[in-house]
Image: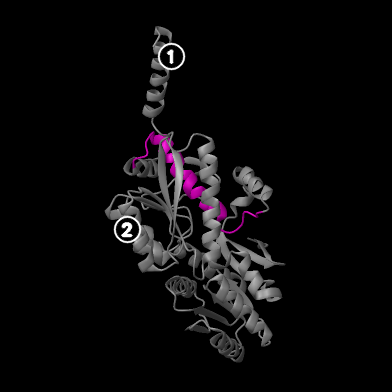
Amino acid sequence: MTVRRLLVLGTLLTGFAMVAAAPAAAEITVGVAVPRTGPYVAVGEQVLRGVQAAARDANARGGLDGQTIVLDVQDDSCDSNQAVGVANHYVQANVRLVVGHVCSNASLAASDVYAAHGIVMITAASVAAKLTDRSLPTIFRVSGRDDDQGKLSAAILAERFRDRRIAILNDLSPASRQLAAATKDNLNRIGVNEALFTAFQASDADDAALADRLKAAGIDVVYYGGDASEMGRLVRIAAERGFRPQWFGTSAIATPDFAKIAGGASNGVLMTFYLDPSRKPEAQSVVAAFKTQGIDADGSMIYGYAALQVLVAAGNFAQSTDAAAIAKALHSERFDTVLGTVGFDAKGDITAQGYVLYVWRDGNFTPAKGN
């Protein structure tokens, strides 16, 4: 072999060695725990779409502390036991950052696992006060709290319907019970007593019986903290039976599914929900990007975006992907997000504006007058 061929061969071998030795692009896995089965699929899809968009945008800007974000999406079906299983999956997979869960019961159950292993969890939709009242150092939320929602609901009922016969319902689910109890307690403190406070088992037959019972009792206003499917069904069945009170729902019905199920009876239904971030200047580029895909950035979609966005911002501030460093930054700093400039208090609650009142019209909800 000639000297020239030896030099060429040596150069090629060196090149191959450099390629083989070159490190793969660094990646960081973020867990996304949402219901992909069960009654809250619509909300889970909203959160997931928001997280996916935030991951795409963050990766286009360099990722999280220079690492490409990869999502590990798991279905908890809004079930407490399944949520614990998802949490343990993330522990075993060494996933240190999680966006989730959606339902409060799932977040409460899984958060104990995350806290015990130093995993940062940030929920886009869980409202149970207990979730953050325990002040677990790695547990956060970008959504509001149910006690704040209960205070607003009670204030609205007292202001607008003090002299009307008010019924407060729950369907025995944890979130529905908590919202009903918080609203009742706050309403009674204001000096207004409801005409009826009752629980029922959600089903078509029971919905019809309940509608007849409410009508016979002369109820004028019905407050109910059920999910979009159940409230939509109850509102529709009640209207079909000639009962059309003023319905008052919660953030659980902030999805187009409610209007699809309730039909025309959804018009005029009131609802408390977080301040609509899609109207904020900070969210307009994200809203526009969704529009190009034929998607309306409604419900919890922007909150899903914000949940991942703030994790990335905290990691980039700390110049670290370490969960403890990110949790410390979340507690101590403020970040520019689609929700505006926000921080988190010692409990892990976000400093963004809380709930406002909306009204449903023609399949969409908009801020109510006098809000």
Region in magenta: 295-322
Q: Nearer the viewer, residue 312 or 5?
A: 5
Mark found first going from the N terminus, 2 or 1 = 1
- Give the residue drawn at x 39%, y 21%: 13
Colour scheme in use = one colour
Could you tell me residue 168's position as x and y percent? Answer: 52, 79
Residue 5 placement, left or right of 135:
right
Q: Quadrant of residue 17?
A: top left
Q: Is residue 315 inside the magenta stretch?
A: yes
Q: Which residue is mark 1?
A: 8
- Give the residue drawn at x 41%, y 16%: 9
Name the quarter where the N terminus is drawn.
Answer: top left
The overriding secondary structure of the stretch rendered in magenta is helix
Could you tell me residue 200's position as x and y percent? Answer: 49, 84
Residue 21 in sight from this viewpoint: yes
- Give the residue drawn at x 56%, y 58%: 46
Residue 180 placement, left or right of 21:
right
User: Is residue 147 depicted above or below 57 in this figure?
Assistant: below
Q: Tell me the number on the disc at residue 88.
A: 2
Q: Amino acid at mark 1?
A: Val
Residue 186 placement, left or right of 132:
right
Q: Amino acid at mark 2?
A: Asn
Q: Is residue 344 inside the magenta stretch?
A: no
Distance from Cα at disc 2 to Cα at disc 1: 53 Å
Residue 354 in sight from this viewpoint: no
